[in-house]
Image (spheres, rainbow, N blue to C red):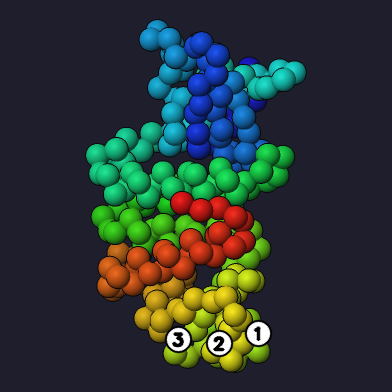
Amino acid sequence: MDEIVKGVVLKARDYKESDKVLTILTASKGKILVKARGVKKAKSKLKAFCQPFCFADFEITHSKFMDILTGARVVDMFFDLVQDYEKYSIASVLLKLLDKICVEGQSYENQFVNSTRCLTAICYLDYNPKLAFIKFVLNLLVGEGVGFNFDNCSGCRAILRDHSYLNLDTGEVVCEKCKGFYNVKISKDVLLLLKEINGTDYENLKNINYKEKNLDETIKILFLDLKQRFDVSF
Ligand SMILES: [Zn+2]
């Protein structure tokens, strides 16, 4: 073993007859690909760790073509996620999003911390998982240097009071006057909800009052923004 890295498995794909290739988002090395040999065999000791959501200290041996998994010590498997279809679906989108946005060879320490905190919240905290997901995306955008400004119009800096717009050409929040041709309206309630979630820790999101339709509207707007900025869609 050459190294121990803390990480979360984003994806596990079959490779050859009995191997898997894991995509792991790590705290120290960003996104890495690791080969797990023989883990499709029933007797494999590492089999349990080679699945999405596994948060562990992974023992890695360096090799010429691809690093090899030689051991793992679990931090959390987030088993409870599979008991709840909605939680599982939302957490799966979170993993896909990270896989699409993070590239190999770049550090993503903030995104790693954000992802484990969000998965913990979705799995164990007793509130609507959509709240945690919205928080996750807002943090993700900040980590990528494209966080929202909910207070001022990105065009003319005017204070955003009532409704505002997401400019679909730039991904920025603007006022009525500055909205471009391609835009989507953000209602006052949704803007307030975004602000509130943005300013609240994962642990305290349970205290937020919301209407389900506003949560769905918020997620719709965030997906439009992700599509514009990173060309990812779900
Ligand atoms: Zn403006």
| Label 2 CB less than 8 angstroms from ligand 1 | yes
Q: Which image quadrant: the N terminus?
A: top right
| Residue 11: % across, % down | 50, 34
Task: Say which amino acid is labelled 3.
Answer: His
Q: Which mark is residue 39?
A: none
Residue 172: quarter of image = bottom right
Query: Is 26 placed above or below 204 here?
Result: above
**Residue drawn where x is 64% and y is 41% of the image:** 30
**Residue drawn where x is 41% and y is 69% of the image:** 218
Instruction: Give the residue at mark 1.
Output: 155
Between the residue at mark 1 and the residue at mark 2, the CA separation in whole angstroms equals 8 Å
**Residue drawn where x is 37% and y is 81% of the image:** 189
Q: Nearer the viewer, residue 6 or 30?
A: 30
Q: Which mark is residue 175?
A: 2
Query: Is 17 placed above or below 50 here?
Result: above
| Label 1 CB less than 8 angstroms from ligand 1 | yes
CB contact under 8 Å: marks 1 and 2: yes
**Residue drawn where x is 51% and y is 53% of the image:** 233
Q: Residues within 10 Å of mark 1 (few under 14, many from 20)?
A: few
Q: Earlier in the sequence, mark 1 or mark 2?
A: 1
Instruction: Give the residue at mark 3.
Output: 163
Secondary structure category for the residue under label 1:
loop
Q: Earlier in the sequence, mark 3 or mark 1?
A: 1
Residue 187: quarter of image = bottom left
Whether residue 172 can be seen here: yes
Task: Say which amino acid is labelled 2.
Answer: Cys
Secondary structure category for the residue under label 3:
loop
Between the residue at mark 3 and the residue at mark 1, the CA separation in whole angstroms equals 15 Å
CB contact under 8 Å: marks 3 and 1: no
